[in-house]
Image (tube, helix red, strand yellow):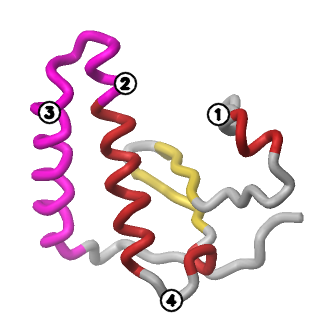
Amino acid sequence: MKPLPPPDDAIERDDAVEVLRGWIVGEDLQISLAFEAFGNNPNLWGQLLAEVAAHVADAMNIEGYGERDAIFAKIRDSVLENMEKSYPGLHGTIRSPVQ
């Protein structure tokens, strides 16, 4: 597995902080996140998720998978639908960041 490269600005700035990574392991999605990065502000996590969706829709559009607005709407609908599900096997561990 090769990690994705960070954005150019993150490489150049000493104050850059990684907040989210995701992997497909078998058929499961697993993530690692720095939940404390935004303090007690769930709105910033919402902004992060919205911006990720926008980037995905833009990339899919550029690669010819459809119109950006239609792709974004499908992502939004899927997020809302999936937020209504319970995830009984979902669990995690709080760990300190790797130095």
What kind of residue is marked 1?
Answer: Leu
Q: Is residue 3 visible?
A: no
Q: Is residue 22 left or right of residue 54?
A: right
Q: Main secondary structure of the magenta part?
A: helix
For residue 23, side relative to residue 49 (left or right): right
The residue to which callout 4 is attached is: 40
User: Label 4 vs label 3: CA separation?
Assistant: 31 Å
Q: Earlier in the sequence, mark 3 or mark 1?
A: 1
Residue beneath the point at 32% across and 28% down = 58
Residue farthest bottom in this picture: 40
User: Is the C-beta separation of discs 4 and 3 under 8 Å?
Assistant: no
Instruction: Identify the disc placed on residue 69.
Output: 3
Q: CA distance from mark 4 to mark 2?
A: 31 Å
Distance (Cα) linking label 3 and label 2: 12 Å
In the picture, the disc for residue 20 is none
Residue type at numbered disc 2:
Ala
User: Measured from the top left, where is residue 96 in percent x and y?
Assistant: 77, 77
Tell me the magenta residue range.
58-86
Residue that mark 2 sits on: 59
Q: Earlier in the sequence, mark 3 or mark 2?
A: 2
Q: Please tell me the numbered disc located at residue 4.
A: 1
Tag count: 4
